[in-house]
Image (cartoon, rainbow, N blue to C red):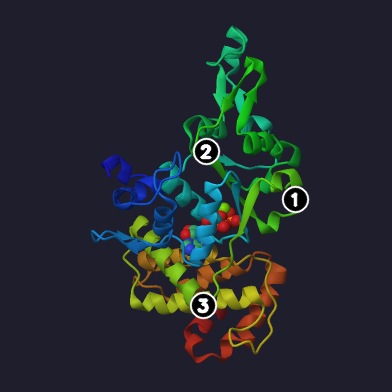
Amino acid sequence: MTDMEQDILRPHAETAYADELTALRAADEGVRPGGWLMSPRAVVRYLMGDTLADGTVISPKYFGDRRLIEVAVASLVTDRALLLVGVPGTAKTWVSEHLTAAISGRSTLLVQGTAGMSEDALRYGWNYARLLAEGPSEEALVPSPIMVGMREGKLVRIEELTRIPSDVQDALITVLSEKILPIPELNRETQARRGFNVIATANDRDRGVNELSSALRRRFNTVVMPLPATLEEEVRIVTDRSLAAAARMQLPPVTQDSAAEITRLVTIFRELRSGRTEDGRTQLKSPSSTLSTAEAISVVNQSRALSHHFGSGDIESEYLAASLAGAVIKDPEQDGVVWREYLEVVMRNRKEYVDLYAALRG
Ligand SMILES: Nc1ncnc2c1ncn2[C@@H]1O[C@H](COP(=O)(O)OP(=O)(O)OP(=O)(O)O)[C@@H](O)[C@H]1O
Ligand SMILES: [Mg+2]
């Protein structure tokens, strides 16, 4: 990385993991589908992590079921697009960024779905000054990321597909089934090159806002991204991601002590989320907040930043408590009640939570 690149707050996956991608391509003996930079098997290795014959360590990006990633990659080989759905914070965006980086070498062809979006954002727009001066021409046309992906044979990401109004979504039907994008003003069309496909993400909680039309749904293979199955798995994800964030925030690396803190935090998140204690004995109420893995990562980052700058350096219960309450209580009234009940019914009676309980009661 150059000095300039070092200053970038969050480099794209293809930059941050350039070494891994290069090594994987060099070692790749599999067959590459047209327009792909590596074989499907190498893509799965990149996502799940591995050690190559030359000793290069490929770090795991996705923690969870390997089969799920295999299914996602296999879908992209077919002529159907891929739709990743799931509750918030289940790595939908994360996985789609890494898939595009590995397969196309570029994760930046991205359309962010919003409620106010028009078809132009999916097809193309115009540079109005030129359009008025010269009339419709190739030069006056402003291609969407989808059009660029079709021309260059690259994967395109559509974030939050179901936030896009249904009639606008339908502009994708021709693109996905015919692999063409008509430009009637110029009396021509863009034909997709090999390597073009779409990875869309959609949030479960948004479902019903704008359902996918059945015509569009048929053009996607859907992969459901689950919440981490076990406490251990979720602790691993949070530890791994906060380690990476620590480097970015110029914080010291996570220590053994923080590992214990992370386990306590993830336990609290899982219990509140599922509405019962890990031992299954006590029923609990769940707060309105999502309490996703992603939020657990933020709580760890925030308490580490607090401790580093204002405390002793490691995560301290005082600072964990401060970040934790903020994550759980989104609606002061309802969530406040749920949270206090959790403190008194569950936390108070656990030896290993004494200090945290005290800090939370404040
Ligand atoms: N199974 C997992 N493996 C690796 N990282 C994970 C996993 N689950 C969550 N994460 C981490 O959680 C963070 C948030 O993930 P991401 O933004 O991709 O979620 P999302 O599913 O797109 O959520 P939203 O629906 O809110 O957009 C990322 O930093 C990601 O690394
Ligand atoms: Mg997302």
Classify residue 225 as left or right of residue 16. right
Q: Secondary structure at mark 3?
A: helix
| Direction top: furthest residue | 133
- Is the residue 60 above or below the residue 11 in the image? below
Q: Percent from the top left, x then y, of residue 284? A: 68, 81
**What residue would you read off at disc 3?**
231
Q: Earlier in the sequence, mark 3 or mark 1?
A: 1
Q: Which mark is residue 209?
A: 1
Q: CA distance from mark 3 to mark 1?
A: 32 Å
Q: Secondary structure at mark 1?
A: loop
Of residue 21 and residue 262, the one placed in the foreground of this image is 21
Give the label, 3 or 2, closer to the camera. 2
Distance from disc 3 to disc 2, alpha carbons, whole Å, reads 38 Å
Whether residue 98 is situated above or below residue 192 in the rendered picture: below
Which amino acid type is marked by label 2? Phe
Q: Is residue 117 visible?
A: no
Q: Which secondary structure, mark 2? A: loop
At label 3, which amino acid type do we have? Leu
Spatial separation of the CA atoms under disc 2 and disc 1: 28 Å
The quadrant of the picture occupied by the N terminus is top left
What type is the residue that disc 1 sits on? Val
Disc 2: which residue: 196
Q: Please report whichever mark, 3 or 2, sits nearer to the chain's N-terminal start.
A: 2
Residue 231 position within the rendered picture, expressed as x and y whole percent measured from the top left: 51, 77
Q: Residue at x 50, y 59 (%)?
A: 70
Q: Nearer the viewer, residue 201 or 76?
A: 76
- Name the residue at 40% across, 73% down: 315
Point out the tag, 2 or 1, that comes first from the N-terminus.
2
Q: At 59% across and 66% down in the image, what residue appears?
A: 226
Q: Nearer the viewer, residue 186 or 235?
A: 186
For the C terminus, the image quarter is bottom right
Instruction: Give percent across and percent down for residue 21.
Output: 34, 50
